[in-house]
Image (cartoon, rainbow, N blue to C red):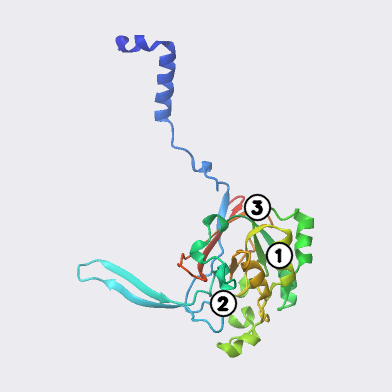
Amino acid sequence: MKALLFPLGLLGLIALGRLLSLAEAEPPAASTSPFAGGRWIDLTHEFAADTLYWPTAQRFQLEVESRAMTPKGYFYAANRYRASEHGGTHIDAPIHFAEKGKTVDQLPVDQLMGPAVVVDVSAQAAADADYQVNVADFEAWEKAHGLLPQGIIVLLRTGYAKRWPDPKTYLGTEQRGAEAVPQLHFPGLHPDAARWLVAQRSIKAIGLDTASIDRGQSSLFESHRILLEQNIPAFENVGDMSLLPATGAHIIALPMKIKEGSGGPLRIVAWVPGAL
């Protein structure tokens, strides 16, 4: 042992001691995670037979292929499903209303995640089913919280998520088919506010807790066209945002990666700082 330690010298012994202490150290604590000190909130409505879709769209259907013990003695479950792209919690890719817009698979992942702000218009929406979030709502938010940061994800909270999945209170009608479309009543984003966001601010994406970024009574879908033509995707039928702060949340919104898709089912979650 002396023959081994002598050539190391004092500095060598110090280095060896450090190596041994590192080897005995505990593994890094979970608190080193960038999402430590907060909690995750699921903002996604589950897909099921009662999931709400546009009145003219194919609703979600789950068909059981297998749910039983196999002849070899193990359990096996598998299903097939069918549905339109636009229903339940989902994404509108830019091509949905912009001929040269990006498809779902072309959207960069970093555009679908990042810091988010919540503009709460639930009081206005409760008083008016056809309410449109306007520029004044954004200006009031900025007066309280500062200018919308560049590259932010904007979430509009109307409070309608709490009405899910009742079609009468959420969509304004229980009917299905083309004749139901004129009876739709739910809040959306005013086209002037969409123009303001595009011209005066820089956002990654926008989402809200109703069936469309345009209000139910819209027939021209102007807010869709304004935003999607700038390759700004929209998240629709987002779940309950009541636990999200006006600032400080972090959003991850990853859709099914459908090649050439105009939209698709979306799993959207929010990380909120603070105690669990």
Please name which of the two marks, 2 or 3, marks the residue nearer to the observer. 3
Closer to the camera, 147 or 99?
A: 99
Q: Amino acid at mark 3?
A: Gly
Alpha-carbon distance for marks 2 and 3?
A: 28 Å
| Residue 31 x/y as whole percent | 53, 42
Quarter location, residue 183:
bottom right
Q: Which residue is mark 1?
A: 120
The secondary element bearing badge 3 is classed as loop
Alpha-carbon distance for marks 1 and 3?
A: 14 Å
Please name which of the two marks, 2 or 1, marks the residue nearer to the observer. 1
Q: Which residue is mark 2?
A: 165
* Left-right relation of 13 to 208: left
| Residue 228 x/y as whole percent | 61, 68
The secondary element bearing badge 2 is classed as loop
> What is the quadrant of the N terminus in the image?
top left
- Can you see residue 84? yes
Alpha-carbon distance for marks 2 and 1?
A: 21 Å
Residue drawn 74% across the image and 77% down it: 128
Sequence-first tag of 2 and 3? 2
Q: Which residue is mark 3?
A: 248
Q: Amino acid at mark 2?
A: Pro
- Can you see residue 159? no
Which residue lies most toward the bottom here? 179
The disc at residue 176 is none
| Residue 45 x/y as whole percent | 53, 69
Quarter location, residue 68:
bottom left
